[in-house]
Image: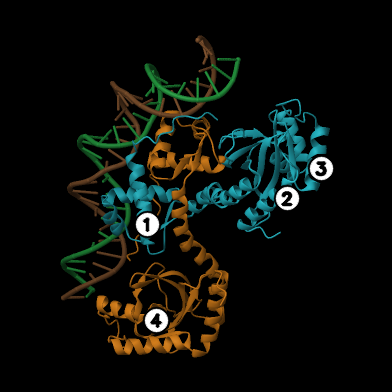
Chain colours: A orange, B cyan, C green, D brown
DNA sequence: GGTTTTTGTTTCATAATGTGAAATATGAAA
DNA sequence: TTTCATATTTCACATTATGAAACAAAAACC
């Protein structure tokens, strides 16, 4: 993904401003009449009515038997999605910082999205040379430690589909570009409980990756350490696994 | 509250339609670029950009380091309120139905709102004569069983404030209209763990009320049985408490 | 390292869109 | 019943959001 200036532009859309004002008023009041909402938001009753009505059509707002306005079910659906992006990061960050302080290298949190992993959180050490992935950037599953574990979890037939779709493009000379190589590495990683990336995504960069699970045991993310290949030590595996376990525990994972 | 026709009017506001389309696309995709969002929603990129920007100003949407769009934190805040209105009802309903079937009278779920309780859910029996509160209607705290428990939870100084503000208007000859009477009743109710309404809101109607709590132990609602006074039996108290306990447990209450 | 391509951002003339005053309908209260 | 309060609909108007096009910035390519 390309990174743009991303300075928050200050212009806004009137109807959206008013809509949010109404939603906030509803959240504060609980359930209310049109009159109160109009007064509270300083909107003309007619205007408030029209906006509320439009929100009802989308399930953002609903009305009870008595005609009072309430926040609607669609908000719950939207928030459920927002929560995944938010909670995970908030929970993981302190643990990731601990891990970074133990080993002095960059620690990443990734999430699967289609045939790629997305970097959703990162903490880096204070060193001149370090590996740094931009939060929000992506990489194909087969060139990352975490990605290979995710593929392994999915099972052989899904891996074959993935191979067919993507043709396993090479990123470096070390990338596993054929089925046999890839399956062998994945199998080994699954049995070990952690995966390695030996300069498969970028020359000079090596990783150790493990999985993070939630209460239901489902994989929700991956935790990895990225370092210049000559600095990476396999002694770190224990620490990385320990950290991932703590994050999983926070997410409700029992095992 | 007055009850109006409340047939969903079908006219809508264009910007809100488009905004919701964008939010839905974001929820489906997880995190995406402007280009994908514009394509997915069939909006002009320029239009999508402006609407997204307006939502960012309100925290409904945010962007990560790489510039990708994500659902924002304000949705979580709104949803927290919506959840109380929704989950509570959904969780409570089957338990309320069970209680109604046990005793054959109307069962109400109420929530505090300012100096009143609001009826948020009701299940009634199949009988000719029964007590029926409209969902969404309100009653002052001091004339309802649940309301008196809520006042008791709040403590004496809050009760005094309440008395000052409202002057304890009388609804029937049985309404507690002076501080001493009210405090005595509240105190007795707290120690018993349930409250009664002996024709204090309406002549001929009597109630038994108890509190419902959430994971944090906070009071989130009240459960009550309303019956014609000559039919009400104090034997029901156990069943009412049992039902409230089950609802509290579903809300995460441990005690 | 320069060139092209892609994607994001800003501008601006235009008319479509949302606005609010006023009229109307509906329920509750008296 | 009549009165009153609130909700809903209508409609002429101008403010507002629109989208084409120009511009900027980053990535991809060579």
Do labels 2 and 3 touch, CB within 8 Å?
A: no
Q: Are marks 2 and 1 on the same chain?
A: yes
Can residue A6 be seen here? The reply is no
Do labels 4 and 3 touch, CB within 8 Å?
A: no
Marks 3 and 1: which is nearer the front? Answer: 3
Mark 2, Cα crowd under 10 Å, few <14 / some 14-19 / many 20+, is: few
SS class, disc 2: helix
Front one among B239 and A90: B239
Marks 2 and 3: which is nearer the front? Answer: 2
Residue displayed at 49% across by 75% down: A212
Quarter of the image for the N terminus of chain A: give it.
bottom left
Give the label on residue B188, or none.
3
Where is B128 relative to A250, above or below?
above
Marks 2 and 4: which is nearer the front? Answer: 2
Mark 2, residue position: B238
SS class, disc 3: helix
The residues bearing labels 2 and 4 have C-alpha atoms spaced at a distance of: 54 Å
Marks 4 and 3: which is nearer the front? Answer: 3
Front one among B190 and B97: B97
Mark 1, residue position: B26
Tag 4, which chain?
A: A
Mark 4, residue position: A152
SS class, disc 1: helix
Quadrant of residue D28 within the rendered picture: bottom left
SS class, disc 4: helix
């Amino acid at each position: 993904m390309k990174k743009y200036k991303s300075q928050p532009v200050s212009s806004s859309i009137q109807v959206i401003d008013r809509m949010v004002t109404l939603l906030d008023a509803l959240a504060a009041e609980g359930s209310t009449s049109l009159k109160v909402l109009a007064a509270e938001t300083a909107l003309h009753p007619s205007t408030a009515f029209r906006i509320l009505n439009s929100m009802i059509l989308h399930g953002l707002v609903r009305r009870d038997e008595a005609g009072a306005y309430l926040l609607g079910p669609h908000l719950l659906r939207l928030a459920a999605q927002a929560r995944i992006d938010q909670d995970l990061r908030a929970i993981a960050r302190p643990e990731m910082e601990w891990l970074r302080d133990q080993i002095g290298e960059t620690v990443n949190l990734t999430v699967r999205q289609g045939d790629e992993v997305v970097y959703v959180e990162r903490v880096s050490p204070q060193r001149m040379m370090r590996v740094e992935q931009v939060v929000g950037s992506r990489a194909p599953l087969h060139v990352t430690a975490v990605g290979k574990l995710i593929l392994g979890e999915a099972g052989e037939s899904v891996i074959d589909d993935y191979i067919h779709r993507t043709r396993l493009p090479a990123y470096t000379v070390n990338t596993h570009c054929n089925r046999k190589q890839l399956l062998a590495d994945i199998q080994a990683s699954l049995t070990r409980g952690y995966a390695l990336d030996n300069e498969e995504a970028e020359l000079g960069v090596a990783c150790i990756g493990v999985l993070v699970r939630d209460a239901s045991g489902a994989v929700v993310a991956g935790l990895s350490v990225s370092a210049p290949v000559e600095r990476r030590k396999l002694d770190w595996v224990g620490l990385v696994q320990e950290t991932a376990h703590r994050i999983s525990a926070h997410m409700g994972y029992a095992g």
